[in-house]
Amino acid sequence: MEQQAVALDYQAVLEQVAADVAPLIGSGRPAAYIPALAGVDPGRFGMAVADLHGTVHGVGDWRRPFSAQSITKVFTLALVLAAGGDALWRRVGREPSGNPFNSLVQLEYENGIPRNPFINAGALVVTDALQTLTGDASSELLEFLREESGNPELGFDAEVAASEAAHGDRNAALAHFMASYGNIAGPVPALLDHYFWQCSIEMSCADLTLAARFLARHGLRADGSRLLSRSEAKQINAVMLTCGTYDAAGEFAHRVGLPGKSGVGGGIVAVVPGRCTLCVWSPGLDERGNSVAGVAALDRFTTLTGLSVF
Ligand code: GLU
């Protein structure tokens, strides 16, 4: 059932949200474990909403590209489900991990099967699957994002990718460990390259709201063709709700009430199925890795509009 499209003045709502969260902008700290991200200005804030037809409204730095980081995990997951179907779920679970996103501890006693596709271990498995299915996971992802956002300029940030590779021992450990259980099909060094390139993609709030629209459109792409079945789109939204904001997904669901996926670049994408997509960016992160002003802004948005999945 589509949600009733009660007319909302998104621009006015966004301006209200930006005013309400202004005191929080600059709180928290940009991610420091990837040195190329540590220098981002924590005073930035942008937010955008795209309706189902692709009209975008925004406020603040909503057109400014930032490092999408783990938000890209949503799109790789969608591409794998679109190309390979349900087989992926034999290699990765869909339960919250209750552990930090880059944790190794669960993997050993769960036999190399990551808890979900949004922790780093799970995303490495998804990228490996996309690599097997397409032969070039990062280019496939970039092409998809360019098409859905309508922005042919989207690209990788070579400095961020190199910085991640130089400080990627933990991701390398995760990948090698899973390979020892037979849960990585291709060579680990190539997998890590694709994974780091994906994380380094630069996108604005406007780009991300447009690219994520298939999740609000029950699986339909921007051109009207079907990427995912309605049920697969529902499944991704469900995993975003339960696992998309690190080990604070319960708190995020409590405050925001929408499927969301955050990244350590300070962005968060959220979906109102049947209605719109949202993206907010502010680089100051809380101790769990979610943007402080970003979560607050989404909280204000759903409170002001009443839009939520609940
Ligand atoms: N590239 C980051 C990493 O692998 C992504 C983390 C994130 O945004 O959650 O650690």
Image (tube, grey):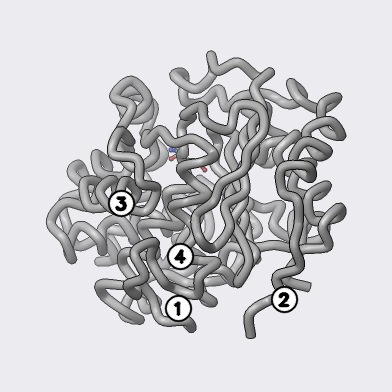
Q: Nearer the viewer, mark 3 or mark 1?
A: 3
- Cα distance in 3D space between marks 3 and 1: 20 Å
Q: Nearer the viewer, mark 4 or mark 1?
A: 4
Which amino acid type is shown beneath numbered disc 1?
A: Glu
Can residue 100 be spotted in the picture? no
Q: Residue furthest left?
A: 135
Mark closest to the chain's N terminus, 3 or 2: 2
Residue 154: horizontal and vertical position, in percent?
A: 33, 36
Residue 150: horizontal and vertical position, in percent?
A: 35, 46
Mark closest to the chain's N terminus, 4 or 1: 4
| Disc assigned to residue 4 | 2
Quarter of the image where one finds residue 220: bottom left
Q: Is residue 67 above or below residue 225?
A: above
Mark closest to the chain's N terminus, 2 or 4: 2
Mark closest to the chain's N terminus, 3 or 1: 3
Mark closest to the chain's N terminus, 4 or 3: 3
Mark closest to the chain's N terminus, 1 or 2: 2
Residue 86: horizontal and vertical position, in percent?
A: 35, 81
| Disc assigned to residue 232 | 1
Query: Mark 3 packing: few (<14 Cα in 10 Å), some, or many (20+)?
Result: some
Residue for badge 3: 147
| Disc assigned to residue 214 | 4
SS assignment at label 1 = helix
SS assignment at label 2 = loop
- Cα distance in 3D space between marks 2 and 4: 18 Å
Which amino acid type is shown beneath numbered disc 4?
A: Phe
- Cα distance in 3D space between marks 4 and 3: 12 Å
